[in-house]
Image: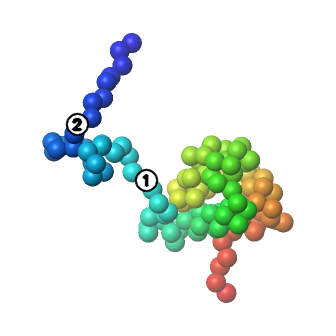
Amino acid sequence: MLKAKRTIGTGRASGNGPRNGRGVVTVGRKREGQPKAVRNTPAGKFGQRLEELMSKSGFTPNEFAERIGKTPDMVRKYLRGDNTPHIDDWPMIAHVLGLKDASDLLPKLPA
């Protein structure tokens, strides 16, 4: 099987992909937080609540993923609001975060 070899230019030629200002091609993009369109959705609010609880408990996404038996990528999807955990996983998540009840994972709603 042949492997494709990727060459990276000096950053002077155009059309070689995005550059980071130092002549190095950047692949993908770093996603910080949630897109505006996701923030006010139920999944987005769950992600914000989960991020808040994880930071209070001192978990990184990788550590948290290991404790709940999910991949770090899946936990990042939860945090971004791209996905939510299956309802059967909520008790384990609540236990790992030190919550009394799985309903404590729900975002606080205004009165």
Give the percent coordinates (x, y) of residue 55: 66, 64
Give the percent coordinates (x, y) of residue 22: 28, 48
Q: Residue at x 70, y 60 (%)?
A: 58
* Res 98 label: none
Element type at mark 1? loop
CA gap, disc 1 to disc 2?
22 Å
Please give left or right for residue 64 compared with residue 22 in the image: right
Residue that protrudes farthest toward the left in the picture: 13
- Quarter of the image containing the N terminus? top left
Give the percent coordinates (x, y) of residue 50: 65, 63
Residue that protrudes farthest toward the bottom in the picture: 111
The image shows residue 88, relative to residue 32, as above or below, that is above
User: Is residue 94 among what the camera can see?
Assistant: no
Counting every numbered tag in the picture gives 2
- Of 93 and 66, the residue lying toward us: 66
Q: Which residue is drawn at 15% across and 42% down?
A: 13
| Neighbour tally class for label 2: few under 14, some 14-19, many 20 plus, Cα within 10 Å | few
Residue that protrudes farthest toward the right in the picture: 100
The image shows residue 111, relative to residue 3, as above or below, that is below
* Res 30 label: 1
Q: In which quarter of the image is residue 81?
A: bottom right
- Of 108 and 18, the residue lying toward us: 18
Lower sequence index among marks 1 and 2: 2
Amino acid found under the numbered disc labelled 2: Gly
User: Is residue 31 among what the camera can see?
Assistant: yes
Q: Residue at x 75, y 68 (%)?
A: 104
Q: Residue at x 26, y 45 (%)?
A: 23
- Indicate the colouring scheme: rainbow
* Res 9 label: 2
